[in-house]
Amino acid sequence: MNSAFKYDLLVVGAGLYGAVVAHRAHRAGKRVLVIDRRSHTGGNCYCEAQDNIFVHKYGAHIFHTSNKEVWGFVNQFVEFKPFVHSPLANYKGEIYPLPFNLNTFDALWGVKSAEEAKAKIEEQRLHLDREPQNLEEQALSLVGRDIFERLIKGYTEKQWGRECKELPAWIIRRLPLRFERNNNYFNDTYQGIPVGGYNPLIDGLLEGVEVRLDTDYFDHREEFDAMAEKVLYTGELDRFYNYRFGKLEYRSLRFEEQQLPQADYQGAAVVNYTDRETPFTRIIEHKYFEDRGTDHTVITHEYPMEWHEGAEPYYPINDERNTSLYAQYRTLADAETKYLFGGRLADYRYYDMHQVIEKALKSF
Ligand code: FAD
Ligand code: UDP
């Protein structure tokens, strides 16, 4: 503890990463201040209660992990309701189960067994004698042309604002591919939704910690730096260095929320619209995360858009240009002694919540 500073640790960003580190530091007897530029804690996990429905304000958030320590950790703060994420795809009015599994292949081709499905894919898949170089090659070589055209191409190009050929192959490998009838979107051992949404988890993590909202670090940078011995920064790394090597690209989103005076809208938590023409990528119906008996419902249309200053940077775009630009910033970050960095934005990585928690626990 250094008494020249009011705080031992300033955490910039009250998202999951910042909250986990703040929790650990506070528990270890450190004097911690957390700030966030938004008017609430929780970052992108934040939920809002609307007449008994917990609305995921920044898109559908399903917790999943195979890490027992992470699962045990979050369960200390909040109870999880078992939930198996099984989104549907709507391609020009035709409905297909996701992720790609025998139910999808049956709906598409009428095949009834793994053998028939594999034969169908084999007929139309791209045969490469090298590793796939981009998302299009990866998708075509894994699942063939029909699935690529109906369920991947339009959705991906809307989501990322780029051709599938310009995107890294691993993005599509996030999705399971199965030859059995199993619509579980994740392969993880544990999966659920916190009862009452994610706010009780964040509140539990930040219990006893001083938090200042509506506070942007860059508005008072010198002042904040003078207050704390160490600074954990979980925002965009290029902004931290005043964009000196150039700007990293992000994908942003626009959420259009509606409360409807009817008990049900689409009968499922998430429906993806996979054609290119529909401007949104998915519709979320929040009540299906918790199965609450209300006579109204809340839905959100999710529209992808290019990031511009002032918009929220939701997704890093890990293509070649951005990856090498990020590496330049990372070299600066790795040499810092006062400043620590972590989370989806500072690491410029497409992390899920369990990965963020795992990283935060390890870093502390
Ligand atoms: P963030 O949540 O982005 O928090 C960073 C915080 O820092 C923000 O609150 C921001 O306001 C603040 N900040 C930044 N700069 C400053 C500054 N200069 N001054 C003050 N404050 C600042 N994960 C899953 O596991 N399952 C899912 O189903 C899932 N669905 C998702 C759906 C969408 C649409 C998105 C975008 C993400 C999804 N994720 C999901 C990922 C999940 O949201 C992230 O892994 C997690 O929230 C990242 O936490 P974080 O703390 O790193 O970042
Ligand atoms: N994807 C797709 N069609 C779908 C769902 C996903 O092509 O119906 C692709 C798309 O490129 C997306 C990626 O798979 O960016 C990863 O999907 P995931 O659901 O993990 O995206 P997230 O929920 O993180 O936005």
Image: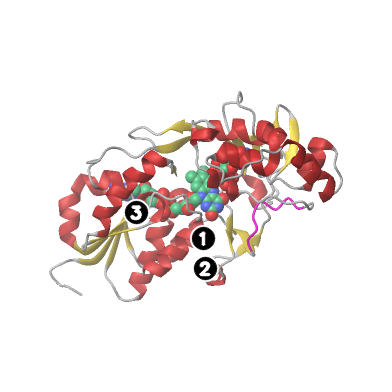
Give the image location of residue 233, x and y in percent. Answer: 30, 55
Q: Residue at x 37, y 53 (%)?
A: 347
- Report the residue marked by disc 1: 354
User: 306 above or below 45?
Assistant: above
Question: Circle 1 sits in a helix, a strand or a loop, which is it?
Answer: helix
Earlier sequence position, callout 1 versus callout 3: 3
Amino acid carrying mark 1 in the image: His
Q: Where does the magenta region start and end? A: 182-188
- Report the residue marked by disc 3: 234
Q: Is there CB contact under 8 Å for labels 1 and 2? A: yes
Dot 1: few (<14), some (14–19), or many (≥20) neighbours within 10 Å?
A: some
Extreme-front residue of the structure: 129
Q: Is residue 106 left or right of residue 234?
A: right
Give the image location of residue 26, x and y in percent. Answer: 34, 71
- Report the residue marked by disc 2: 70
User: Distance between the Cα atoms at labels 3 and 2?
Assistant: 20 Å
Q: Quadrant of the N terminus?
A: bottom left
Question: Circle 2 sits in a helix, a strand or a loop, which is it?
Answer: helix
Amino acid carrying mark 3 in the image: Thr
Q: Is mark 1 within 8 Å of ligand 1?
A: yes
User: 117 above or below 256?
Assistant: below
Give the image location of residue 47, x and y in percent. Answer: 51, 49
Q: Is mark 2 within 8 Å of ligand 1?
A: no
Q: Is residue 62 visible?
A: yes
Dot 2: few (<14), some (14–19), or many (≥20) neighbours within 10 Å?
A: some
Earlier sequence position, callout 1 versus callout 2: 2
Q: Is mark 3 within 8 Å of ligand 1?
A: yes
Q: Quadrant of the C terminus?
A: bottom left
